[in-house]
Amino acid sequence: MKRIFLRLAVSLITFTIGVSATAIHWLYGLPDASLPIVTTIYPRSSCFPGLSVPVPKPGSQTHYFPSRALSYDEWSSQFLNGWYSRQLKAMNELPLSALEKEDESYRFLWLRSFHKPVVIHVGRTGERHFMVVKRLNGLGGYYPGTFDLYWARPLSENDWNAFMVHLEHSTYWKLPTPADIASTDGAQWVMEGYRDGRYHVVDRQSPDAGAYRDACLFLLRQSGLLAEIPAKEVY
């Protein structure tokens, strides 16, 4: 009986070794597998250049906004230009075309009549992306005030691409600029864009739910400001 068990054990071990050797020979005999080359794809807007205007760098745009860009009416355009420019100047902002090191720039100016002015600037330089957030202690509809908050940080590629998708959904570059200002007690949601030597600005007063509002809210959310602002003050 012992001899039978011994023979069975030897046979089992021999069979196992044979199977293992065959498997190893088959595995290493396969041709080398090559991984596919993965190319990073950057979302680009299908609506660019849209209604944008050529403003070449550097510094050719001496004012924040091109002449009569904010309204079809000359008086309204001058009024809005002066109002928005005072806020941007108090935040030490420059015209987007003056930012020579940035390949692509967007700036969201949020002016609520009775709350602190906010600006959020996101940009791309080569493969690097960043976000700058500034807030003043004045009132968006009146006087700017002085700095209440000011910080900058890198922006991940995923967050940048997500913002690009928001702009695409809103057809940002094709949106007409002027806002229909029905009241002086609302909030101005102003988004500027600069890319490939072209400039565009969209101005809306307390926009309803929609893709443009969502794009602006995305920046507020990424900045962390939206989490600390009561819902009734987001208008």
Image: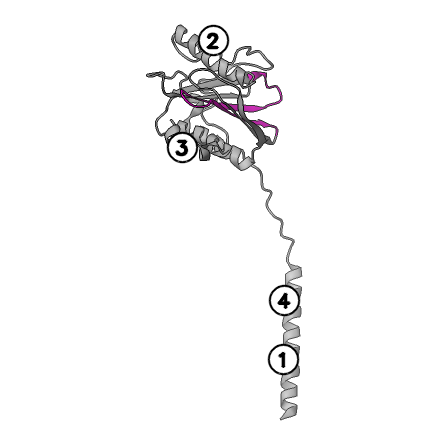
Q: Residue at x 40, y 6 (%)?
A: 75
**For the residue labelled by badge 3, is the local secondary structure a helix, a strand or a loop?**
loop
Pair 4/3: label in front: 3
Q: In terms of sequence position, does the residue under pointer 1 or pointer 4 come before the other?
A: 1
Q: Position of residue 190 (x, y in %)?
A: 44, 21
Q: Is residue 137 magenta?
A: no
In this rendering, the answer to whether 187 lies above or below 80 is: below
Alpha carbons under labels 4 and 3: distance apart: 65 Å
Residue linked to disc 3: 230
Alpha carbons under labels 2 and 3: distance apart: 36 Å
Pair 1/3: label in front: 3
Q: Residues within 10 Å of mark 1 (few under 14, many from 20)?
A: few
Alpha carbons under labels 1 and 3: distance apart: 74 Å
Q: As drawn, which residue projects farthest toward the bottom?
A: 1
Label placed on residue 23: 4
**For the residue labelled by badge 4, is the local secondary structure a helix, a strand or a loop?**
helix
The image quadrant of residue 166 is top left
Label placed on residue 12: 1
Residue type of the residue flagged with mark 1: Leu
Residue linked to disc 2: 67
Q: In which quadrant of the rendered image does the N terminus lie?
A: bottom right
Residue type of the residue flagged with mark 4: Ala
Q: Which residues are magenta?
A: 97-126
Q: As drawn, which residue projects farthest toward the left?
A: 182
Q: Is residue 125 magenta?
A: yes
Foreground of the two, 32 or 188: 188
Alpha carbons under labels 4 and 2: distance apart: 76 Å
Pair 1/4: label in front: 1
Q: As drawn, which residue projects farthest toward the top?
A: 75
